[in-house]
Amino acid sequence: MNTRIIMGLLAFGLMLNNAFAQDRLAIERVKEGLYNITGAGGNVGVRVTSEGVILIDDKFPQDYDEIQRLVSQVSDLPVKYVINTHHHGDHTGSNESFLSVAEIVAHQNARDNMVRADQPGQPRMVFTDETAVYLGGVEVRAFYLGTGHTNGDAVVYFPDLNTVHGGDLLHGIAPFIDYANGGSSRGWVTTLNNMLTMDFDTAIPGHGAVMTRDDVIDFRNQMESVRSYMTSLIRDGMPKGEASVRIRNEALSWTMVDDGLFMQRSIPGFYDEIAAEIRQ
């Protein structure tokens, strides 16, 4: 084949690959000055101010350049802060790159989990109960409301927009309870109740579509219902080895999901947690 044709085909293939890579993520408007970057990995909140941008989470390591490109579509100012909702790599993966241009903030337990796992991009700034970032006349607050998905979940609040970013405390399909890092279904219900004392009408979950306050209430209610159902099964003598099958209930949508988030990963620890509560 002619060399010029070969080079043309290679260039065309590279162009297609680049186009595909650029389409991997997308940015959507949530409210005035607040955006959400969707796609593989955790949802990234983008709060635009007159002095720079505050991000909530930053997906995977390979997403840094595309996150920056999408941010540039809504602001010509740099990212100044990144607030991590927890330590998992699909939410903190670009930390290492952002540390060269921004400050990263996380709960102390989230940083401790990153240190224990030897994850790159460990935050230089931490908090225990609450903290705030003030930039360009905008206030963004971060609260620790209790255990749930992990022991280091931050709820990020945009008070002027009546909006929260809940990280993986909120999920569009089914939650994963990370027992190895302090997760708890009982704690999760309490944490959601604490979240619901806040004044918000919109919530960005860790994964999935933007939620309303009623969606958050429904999420809390299903957590309570799944806990109650597991309790009844264990009280009826269900052995641990049967839990992942017998927990399935069409009235409880989480238990019907086979993507590994709830059924395959959380059930053993969930069984142990509920069984321990029954013995108390």
Image (spheres, rainbow, N blue to C red):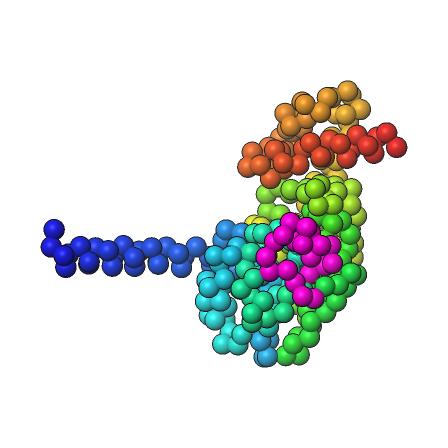
Q: Quadrant of residue 204?
A: bottom right
Query: What is the span of residues highlighted in magenta in the rendered image?
Result: 106-125
What residue do we see at 63% from left, 79% from top? 136
Left or right: 64, with 91 as reference point: left
Along the viewing direction, whichever of 202 and 180 lies nearer the viewer: 180
What residue do we see at 56% from left, 66% from top? 98
Q: Is residue 119 magenta?
A: yes
- Up the image or down, 165 lies above or below 265; here it is below
| Residue 78 picture location, percent across and down | 54, 74
Q: Is residue 247 magenta?
A: no
Outermost residue to the left: 2
Left or right: 222, with 96 as reference point: right
| Residue 149 picture location, percent across and down | 69, 47
Of the 4 image quadrants, the one containing the C terminus is top right
Residue 274 visible at all: yes
Left or right: 255, with 70 as reference point: right
Outermost residue to the right: 280
Q: Quadrant of residue 228?
A: top right
- Up the image or down, 140 lies above or below 222; here it is below
- Up the image or down, 11 lies above or below 256; here it is below
Q: Quadrant of residue 6?
A: bottom left
Along the viewing direction, whichever of 122 and 243 lies nearer the viewer: 122
What residue do we see at 79% from left, 48% from top? 190
| Residue 263 picture location, percent across and down | 62, 33
- Up the image or down, 250 lies above or below 145; here it is above
Residue 209 visible at all: no
| Residue 14 picture location, percent across and down | 29, 57
Total numbered circles: 0
